[in-house]
Image (cartoon, rainbow, N blue to C red):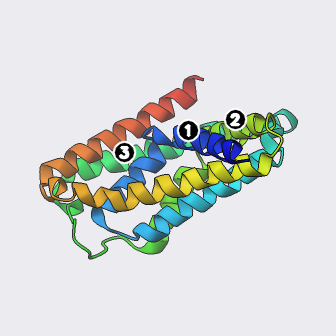
Amino acid sequence: MVSTYFAGFALGFSLILAIGAQNAFVLRQGLRREHVFWICLTCSVSDALLVAAGVAGFGSLATYVPWFEPVMRYGGAAFLIVYGAMSLRNAWRGGSALVTGNGATSGLAASLLTVLALTWLNPHVYLDTVVLIGSISAQYADRLQFGLGAVSASFVFFFTLGYGARLLAPLFARARAWQVLDVIIALIMWAIAARLLIM
């Protein structure tokens, strides 16, 4: 049972470890100290729901609903292109996004809508979390323990990323660092969008 839990934890952690659109947003919010708890909780709960769906056997949804995958792919790519353009605009403008203190500069609702879109409009989250975790969990006798391990990995990762970002705050007290981060985020968004469009 313990080994099954840690197998799920290891797989879940490895799938969300790579920097992506969602992770870049969590990092940015952590650096700005804006709604960190709610952003991390939203990401973790979203992952938990997706893992639960995969473990429950919904990993084959694309087989039964053929239009689901292309709609998610093109819709997700469009969203990422727009979000990347907004990040590049922030980098170009500079100082407007350089708040590292405790004062929030964007509303909670807007931040939650952004992170929900980055999570649920990303087709890769369905392939990785639902299909991959779901199919691998089927190899274990105790799928529940495997799923709980993967869910735990999400909570550990997102809260560590969100609150650990504060350690980088001295670096991001400089305007240039924020501009570089915004450019990197834009490039990540566009790279993921390009991969979605050519797959």
Q: Which residue is mark 2?
A: 132
Q: Which residue is mark 3?
A: 85
The residues tagged by marks 3 and 2 sit, at their Cα atoms, a distance apart of: 31 Å
Q: How many marks?
A: 3
Residue drawn at (45%, 70%) of the image: 37
Q: Which mark is residue 15?
A: 1
| Mark 3 or 2, nearer chain start | 3
Residue at image x 60%, y 45%?
9
Left/right placement of residue 34 relative to residue 58 reads left
Task: Quote the CA–CA distance across marks 1 and 3.
Answer: 26 Å
> Which numbered mark, 1 or 3, is in the foreground of this view?
1
The C terminus lies in quadrant: top right
Residue kind at label 1, given as amino acid type: Leu
Q: Are marks 2 and 1 in contact (CB under 8 Å)?
A: yes
Residue type at tag 2: Leu
Of callouts 1 and 3, the N-terminal one: 1
Using a 10 Å C-alpha cutoff, classify the residue at mark 2 as few (fewer than 14 neighbours), some (14 to 19) or many (20 or more): some
